[in-house]
Amino acid sequence: MPDYSIAVVDDEEAIRDSILMSLEDRYRMIAYATAEKAFSAMRKAPPDLILMDIGLPGMSGLEALKKIKREHPEVLVIMITAYEDIDTVISAMKAGAHDYVVKPLHMEGLEISIGNALETIRLRKEVKALQSRYLEEHIPCFIGESKAIREVMEFIKTVARSQDTPVLIQGETGTGKELIAAAIHYNSPHWKAPFATVNCAAIPKDLIESELFGYARGAFSGASADGKQGLVEAAANGTLFLDEVGDLSPQAQAKLLRFLESGEFYRLGGSQRMEIKTRVVSATNRDLVKMMAAGDFRKDLYFRLGVVRVKIPSLNERPDDVLPLAKHFLKEFSERFGKKFSGISTEAQQALLHYNWTGNVRELKNVMEAAVLVARGPELLRADLEPAFPDGGGDAVAADWPDCKEEFPEEGFCLTSRLAGIEKRYIQKALRVAGGNESQAARLLGMNHHTFRYRRKKLSTH
């Protein structure tokens, strides 16, 4: 029998002792006289299952049940009642009780109820373990050590709990928006259901509607005799990921809005109303607010798509993630190309840290792939990287000291914001060299500690 833990919460000592004596040879048992004492202990280690009396002194069993389901939703609860009060039992089951038993207790019946609850817990743990293995095998890890990306990943886990809330992912090209969408799907309760993706920018505007919603028999010249299922149907009960959603035509926007609001749609050229449950996750690198102002994107669709919004920071905004990502890609491409690299040289690491990653993670991955492919090893050198940089590493040099070589655009530019960006990079670099020590970083930049802290806070540098 697996090592399950069971808590008994009952104000009657005789009942507590009776249950403990019957079960302690098979399970890890603990007992409490009040819900308050049980909650105090659960903060450190919640049990797998709770047997709880409805008529507790102080906080009632029904109140405690509701709190348990809010704070520890994974814990199952079997309610104990002194009499078969149907209204109380119904209230408990609606509040999330797994089962109930009636006093006076019959151990045979109680053990059957416990056995059913523990089987549910076992299956849940199996599914969770299977889900974790699936994520490791099929979904690339969203690697990062920075505070910014850790916050994004924690937020994603929270968002994923909902099965149908639309999510809008915003971020620059190459930041990993599809990866975030996949993480939302595969951390959700419907992770086994389909995950369908479509790049709205890659499909001609006159075809996107039929790709999303399908078409009926004879909808247009050349249409399949049997019609065609759209991606909305293909993602039934799962997730539909719309990449570059800002490229949708006005007609497709209107039809998508209708689907989001009602769950209903019609195939192109069809008269049969279709009803599908599909979670829509969308992404864009375009400024939808500006597009709305210009009349190119529907305001109502924007708010419907972005019930929850996830902003992915650029790679330049999270420099602490550059080397962990580079080492991950080094391992990935070493295995792919049959090479054995021991690591990345200090000079190569500095080049990676100094480079201006305008293409974000995608650009870093491409640079590492090219470098690993041609390098001999066993250590990846700066000389291996420079041919792989699109400009031969010019951005890495520019990051050491920005040079004024560019032509001024006719409309001008904001020098203050550019200088702030340069200052921010230097502060981040000084902190890395100083191992996070502000006083030492300030000395490296020729600042006093007070000025350094002020500038760091003002520029929101972590």
Image: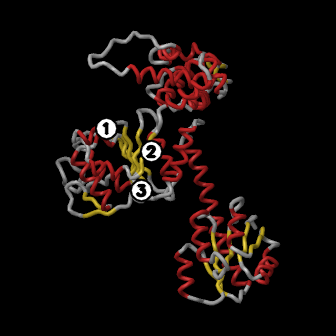
Residue 449 appears left or right of 90: right
Residue 397 makes an appearance in the image: yes
Q: Disc 1 versus disc 3: distance between alpha carbons?
A: 24 Å
Q: Residue at x 27, y 19 (%)?
A: 411
Q: For residue 377, which quarter of the picture?
A: top right
Q: Is residue 66 above or below residue 157?
A: below
Q: Secondary structure at mark 2?
A: strand
Q: Residue furthest left?
A: 221
Label pair 1/3, CB-CB below 8 angstroms: no
- Residue 332 visible in the displayed image: no
Q: Which mark is residue 201?
A: 1
Q: Which of the two discs, 1 and 3, sits closer to the camera?
A: 3
Between residue 38 and residue 215, name the one nearer to us. 38
The earlier-in-sequence mark between 2 and 3 is 3
Q: Tag 3, which secondary structure?
A: loop
Q: Residue at x 58, y 53 (%)?
A: 131
User: Residue 432 at what x, y percent from top left?
Assistant: 62, 25
The image quadrant of residue 419 is top left
Residue neighbourhood size for the residue with mark 1, other residues' Cα within 10 Å, grouped as few (<14), some (14–19), many (≥20): some
Amino acid type, callout 2? Val
Residue 308 rendering spot, x and y as whole percentages: 42, 51
How far apart, in angstroms, are the residues tagged by discs 2 and 3? Answer: 13 Å
**Residue 255 screen position, x and y as percent:** 25, 53
* Residue 6 appears left or right of 369: right
Q: Quadrant of the N terminus?
A: bottom right
Q: Quadrant of the C terminus?
A: top right
